[in-house]
C-alpha cells in the first residue's frame, strides 16, 4: 500500500509512484499545481507546495494516497 506523506518532495512522489499510477499527475494538476516541471519540485515538500498554493496539504496527501491505492 502506497503511503505518500506531506514531507515527501514532489520529485520523490513522482519518482516512487508515477510509473505505478500516472493519475497522480492529474490529481496535482486538478488541485492547481504544475509540479511536474517546476524547479522547486526537486526540493519542496508536498506540504510546502500545497500551502504555497493555498491548498490543504492533508487533503492533497489523502487524495494522492487514495488515487495510488485504488
Image: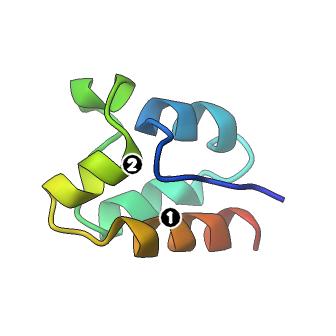
Q: Earlier in the sequence, mark 2 or mark 1?
A: 2
Q: Residue at x 46, y 30 (%)?
A: 11
Residue 52, image x and y in percent? 15, 53
Q: CA distance from mark 2 to mark 1?
A: 8 Å
Task: Specify the label residue 46 is tagged with.
Answer: 2
Instruction: Check if mark 2's residue and mark 1's residue have beta carbons within 8 Å.
Output: yes
Picture quadrant where residue 15 is located? top right
Q: Is residue 62 above or below residue 14?
A: below
Residue 59, image x and y in percent? 43, 76
Residue 49, image x and y in percent? 26, 48
SS at badge 2: helix
Of residues 14 and 43, the one drawn nearer to the viewer in this rendering: 43
SS at badge 1: helix
- Location of mark 1 (residue): 61
- Quadrant of image for the N terminus: bottom right
Of residues 26 and 47, the one drawn nearer to the viewer in this rendering: 47
Q: Residue at x 35, y 52 (%)?
A: 47
- Quadrant of image for the C terminus: bottom right
Amino acid at each position: 500500500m502506497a503511503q505518500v506523506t506531506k514531507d515527501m518532495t514532489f520529485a520523490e512522489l513522482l519518482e516512487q509512484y508515477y510509473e505505478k499510477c500516472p493519475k497522480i499527475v492529474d490529481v496535482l494538476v486538478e488541485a492547481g499545481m504544475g509540479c511536474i516541471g517546476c524547479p522547486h519540485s526537486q526540493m519542496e515538500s508536498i506540504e510546502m507546495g500545497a500551502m504555497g498554493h493555498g491548498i490543504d496539504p492533508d487533503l492533497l496527501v489523502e487524495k494522492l494516497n487514495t488515487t495510488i491505492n485504488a
